[in-house]
Image (cartoon, rainbow, N blue to C red):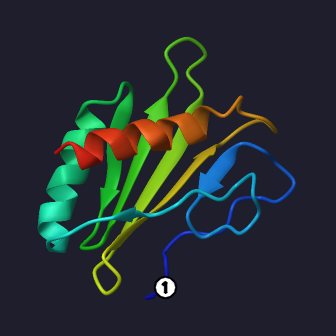
Amino acid sequence: MDTVPFTHCPTNKKNCVSTIDLTSYHRIAPIPFSGNAEDTKERIRKALNELNGAEIKEEKSHYLHAVFTSKWMKFKDDLELYIDEKTHLLHIKSGSRLGYYDFKVNRKRVEQFKEKFNNQ
């Protein structure tokens, strides 16, 4: 696997999930995909458009960074996606910027994203 451009979740907080973490609380499975990076990015953009509060902040050839802002308290959560064309896996990290515990909001968001992405 090429180097994933994001870091592990903080081990002392329960407000993050990622495909590169090994702890059971933080670990989430990557999403298999077919096609090239451009097609995959288009599917990512469509899936993000179907989720509430997403705004793409950065986009590179194999990487996207979106920020979700909560409706009421305006908390910001970061969603990072890395397209690994060698393994045909989409790696994800979703984490809250503030707090210790997120009530599994980030895990639920990734599951919703997976569902929308797989239906594109």
* Left or right side of 100 for 86: left
Q: Residue at x 58, y 39 (%)?
A: 106
Looking at the image, the residue that sits furthest to the right is 12
Q: What percent of the width, then of the height, locates residue 100?
A: 82, 39
Q: Which residue is mark 1?
A: 3
Q: Residue at x 60, y 70 (%)?
A: 20
In this picture, is 83 found above or below 55? below
State which quarter of the image contains the C terminus.
top left
Q: What percent of the width, then of the height, locates residue 7?
A: 62, 69
- Residue 98, quarter of the rendered image: top right
Amino acid beneath label 1: Thr
Residue nearest the observer in this picture, 33 or 8: 33
In this picture, is 1 found above or below 21? below
Crowding near the residue tagged with mark 1, few <14, some 14–19, many ≥20 C-alpha atoms within 10 Å: few
* Left or right side of 91 for 97: right
* Left or right side of 83 for 93: right
Q: What percent of the width, then of the height, locates residue 8?
A: 67, 67
Q: Residue at x 55, y 21 (%)?
A: 74
**Mark 1, secondary structure of its residue:** loop
Q: Residue at x 49, y 85 (%)?
A: 3
Q: What percent of the width, then of the height, locates residue 73?
A: 61, 16
State which quarter of the image contains the N terminus.
bottom left
Instruction: Please give the count of numbered marks on the rendered protein.
Output: 1
In this picture, is 98 found above or below 5? above
- Residue 102, quarter of the rendered image: top right
